[in-house]
Image (tube, rainbow, N blue to C red):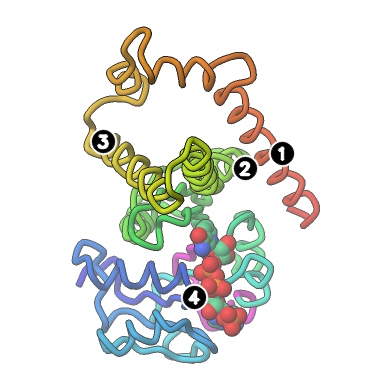
Amino acid sequence: MSSQNSHVVLIGAGRMGAALAAGWLRRKSSGVTADTLTLIDPRPSDAAQALAEEFGVTLAAAADETTLKRADTLVAAVKPALTPEVLAPLAEGLSPNALVISIAAGVPLRVVESALPDRPAVRAMPNTPASIGKGVSVCIANDRAGPAERRRADRLMKAAGVVEWIEDERLMDAVTAVSGSGPAYLFLFCEALAAAGEAEGLPPELARKLAQATISGAAAMLEAGVGDPGELRRMVTSPGGTTQAGLDVLMGGAGLPGLIRNAVAAAERRGRQIGAASGS
Ligand SMILES: NC(=O)c1ccc[n+]([C@@H]2O[C@H](COP(=O)([O-])OP(=O)(O)OC[C@H]3O[C@@H](n4cnc5c(N)ncnc54)[C@H](OP(=O)(O)O)[C@@H]3O)[C@@H](O)[C@H]2O)c1
């Protein structure tokens, strides 16, 4: 066990909380073991209950005084709207040195800081693939979080995939518009590719399989570092060939780059509006 992760309390063992906990328990590098983790949730997900049984992790409906006192890291994975009201009652029992990590989408650091004042805090924005350890999380720390706390948060969030850090919280809306909403853009692309295949006469099931396997395969090439996206695109595009004909449409006047630009701008704007409406 790492001395830096002497005890982690996870509040909210739903989809993302259970996925994070599974990542910690399955990866030695997280420094978290069944003995150094407590899951808190009045109605835990099936995945969290299975995890508690498999690893023998303590799963409780509420955090008791002893658990809170020994926690040096508290990870909040409850719904954004609930985050302040779930955290505030813990302020008295939680050690003043405990690192607070919130993964609530759209909840700014200062909301976490006002619920649990005077503590090192990190806001992390993971995305959906984090639920299978293939996500990307963007983190920002408050002034009280020093290098040791940042390293601890980095190590814990790596259970969900890649971790990046930013220093300007205003960029979180752009982060959300790119990596937070990004998986949905890709899922739509997959649906559209399958529908287009069907329109060209492919049986629906075959069209769906081809679209899905193509996107997974192309993503795997990017992950394997075969080349950057532009390079890979040029590699499969012979002048005057079929791919060129398709790309001429996608890259033409009202094509995909402009659409994506507008989509990301709209998502970023919506993030700012939601933040403003919630007083953030
Ligand atoms: N899922 C994603 O892809 C994703 C991506 C980025 C960020 N996030 C963030 O991650 C957080 C969790 O999302 P999720 O998808 O995992 O939601 P979720 O499945 O609803 O999990 C939240 C869990 O917290 C529980 N809970 C409610 N009140 C609680 C309390 N007082 N103490 C302890 N636990 C309590 C909920 O129980 P009940 O269901 O009974 O209320 C539920 O089991 C959200 O803030 C979200 O913005 C999620």
Task: Determine whether, in the image, residue 225 is placed left or right of residue 239.
Answer: left
Question: How much space separates mark 1 and mark 4, taking CA atoms?
Answer: 28 Å
The residue at the far top in this view is: 239
Residue identifier under label 4: 14
Q: Is residue 224 above or below residue 143?
A: above
Question: How much space separates mark 4 and mark 2, taking CA atoms?
Answer: 24 Å
- Most foreground residue, 69 or 243: 243
Question: Could you tell me the amino acid type at mark 3?
Answer: Met
Residue identifier under label 3: 221
- Tell me what residue is drawn at x 54 percent, y 19 percent: 249
SS label for mark 1: helix
Residue identifier under label 1: 269
Question: Could you tell me the amino acid type at mark 4?
Answer: Gly
SS label for mark 4: loop
Displayed quadrant of residue 30? bottom left
Q: Is 222 included in the stretch rendered in magenta?
A: no
Q: Can residue 103 be seen in this view?
A: no
Q: Residue 88 carries which label?
A: none
Going from N to C along the chain, the mark reached first, 1 or 4, is 4
Question: How much space separates mark 1 and mark 2, taking CA atoms?
Answer: 8 Å
Residue identifier under label 2: 173
Establish whether ligand 1 lies closer than 8 Å to the Cβ of label 4: yes
- Most foreground residue, 13 or 255: 255
Q: Where is residue 163 in the image (x, y as percent from the top left)?
A: 37, 48
Tell me if label 1 and label 2 are in contact, CB under 8 Å: yes
Q: Position of residue 198 (x, y in %)?
A: 49, 43
Q: What stretch is highlighted in magenta?
A: 87-102
